Image (cartoon, grey):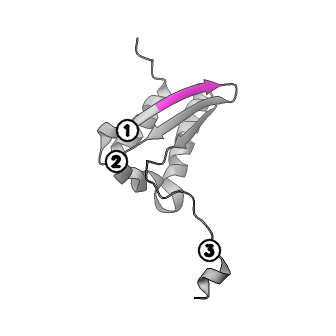
Amino acid sequence: MAEEKLPYQELLEYVIKSLVDHPDDVKVDRKVDEMGVLLTLKVHPEDMGQIIGREGSTARSIRTIVRISGLKNHARVNLKIEEPEGGRGPRQKESIEELKI
């Protein structure tokens, strides 16, 4: 039996598939716990830049839309964007010694 998609999940899929170049690779997983609903978004690695946007502005806007849609449906919804395998990982600060070369 297929899991029923909730309105905020359908909204997220629609918005993301409209933004990316590989809409068939968009996957949204839903996990419900005592903190609310966690939607996990996975996209094609080439589409990450379009989802994140300049300085994270697109991702921030998508999270806001999903959160508001969740509130309308009486749910606390958060969005996690999964970084694809081989992604760049967290930034590391360069030490002053490395810069004095």
Residue at which label 3 appears: 94
Rendered position, 65 above or below 6: below
Q: Nearer the viewer, mark 3 or mark 1?
A: 3
Please tell me which residue is depicted at 48% across the width and 48% down the height of the picture.
83
State which quarter of the image contains the N terminus. Answer: top left
Q: Which element is circle 3 on?
A: loop
- Mark 1 residue type: Val
> Quick check: is 19 in the magenta stretch?
no
* Residue contact at pointers 1 and 2, CB within 8 angstroms: yes
Which stretch appears magenta? Answer: 29-33
Which structural element holds mark 2?
A: loop
**Disc with the residue nearer the chain's start (2 vs 3):** 2
Give the quadrant of residue 100: bottom right
Which one is closest to the eye, mark 1 or mark 2? 1
Q: Earlier in the sequence, mark 1 or mark 2?
A: 2
Mark 3 or 1, nearer chain start: 1
Question: What kind of element bears circle 1?
Answer: loop
Real-space Cα separation, disc 3 to disc 1, in angstroms: 35 Å
Q: CA distance from mark 1 to mark 2?
A: 9 Å
Quarter of the figure that contains the C terminus: bottom right
The residue positioned 47% from the left and 62% from the top of the image is 54
Query: Against 22, is 98 above or below?
Result: below
- Disc number placed over residue 26 in the picture, else none: 1
Please indicate whether residue 24 sits to the left or right of residue 33 in the image: left
Residue closest to the eye, 67 or 42: 42
State whether residue 8 appears in this view: no
Residue at image mark 2? 20
